[in-house]
Image (tube, helix red, strand yellow):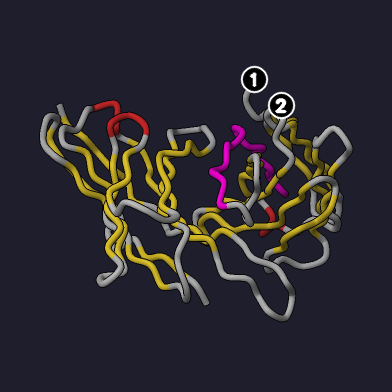
Amino acid sequence: AQSVAQPEDQVNVAEGNPLTVKCTYSVSGNPYLFWYVQYPNRGLQFLLKYITGDNLVKGSYGFEAEFNKSQTSFHLKKPSALVSDSALYFCAVRDVLNPNTGFQKLVFGTGTRLLVSP
Amino acid sequence: KAGVTQTPRYLIKTRGQQVTLSCSPISGHRSVSWYQQTPGQGLQFLFEYFSETQRNKGNFPGRFSGRQFSNSRSEMNVSTLELGDSALYLCASSLGGLAGGSEQYFGPGTRLTVT
């Protein structure tokens, strides 16, 4: 089964410092990878995605992510963190087509809480 | 453009009842997906509808069902509610759906509490 792992439940960083939120994936074939952010009492917001092409993907709010096929990773990064970046971040991968059902789904990681201190 | 809207925002039901949640996608989006979010299980995919057809389905029992109308609005129904169905139910719309690798735009969710 396809899966994503977010090894850190929480990441703490001081405002102005660079931040990294880690994600590794397990999928057969070429992965479709996504990052979403969730603020309290709100739905998820799309940040960026990788489907093909340049391994460095730039997204919303100054975030970027690097696709690394050999390490099966898709870490989210930002050069300078803001207090307002504090939120819950989810990595997701699109599952491959199930040959029995013809279905596929989006599989989310467990989420990483980012806390940016002033 | 208006975002994804979900109604109602909060709902309290008792075990054994059924519930219907509604989702209006972003104008022009033909794909609507539903997710269940709980502290224990995280975010889990329920199903996706595209142009009124169920295109994809997650690993949920048949008590969970949905449909999509010709205007792309979607409803999700849960019958014979159980305590474990208490969750935040999120709806997301996209242009091309999962098959196209399109990013999804989420609504604020419906918080369902089953007592």
Q: Dot 1: few (<14), some (14–19), or many (≥20) neighbours within 10 Å?
A: few
| Badge 2 or badge 1: first in the primary sequence | 1
Locate residue A88 relative to residue B39 in the image: left or right: left
Number of numbered discs present?
A: 2
Locate residue A85 relative to residue B40 in the image: left or right: left
| Region in magenta | B101-115
**Residue A57 percent across, percent down from the top left:** 32, 45
Q: Could you tell me how far apart the alpha carbons at marks 2 and 1 are, in whole angstroms?
A: 7 Å
- For the residues labelled 2 and 1, say whether their Cβ atoms are less than 8 Å apart: yes
**Residue A117 percent across, percent down from the top left:** 17, 32
Q: Is residue A67 above or below residue A1?
A: above
Task: Determine the residue located farthest toward the top in the rendered image.
Answer: B1
Locate residue B31 relative to residue B62 in the image: left or right: left
Q: Amino acid at mark 1?
A: Ala
Foreground of the two, B96 or B4: B96
Q: Quadrant of residue A99?
A: bottom right
| Residue occupying image coordinates x 41% and y 56% | A52
Q: Chain of mark 1?
A: B
Q: Chain of mark 2?
A: B
Foreground of the two, B70 or A114: B70
**Residue A59 percent across, percent down from the top left:** 36, 37
Q: Quadrant of the C terminus of chain A?
A: top left
Query: What residue sits right under mark 2 in the picture?
Result: B27
Between circles 2 and 1, the one closer to the viewer is: 2
Query: What residue sits right under mark 1 in the picture?
Result: B2
Locate residue B13 relative to residue A81 in the image: left or right: right
| Residue occupying image coordinates x 26% and y 72% | A70
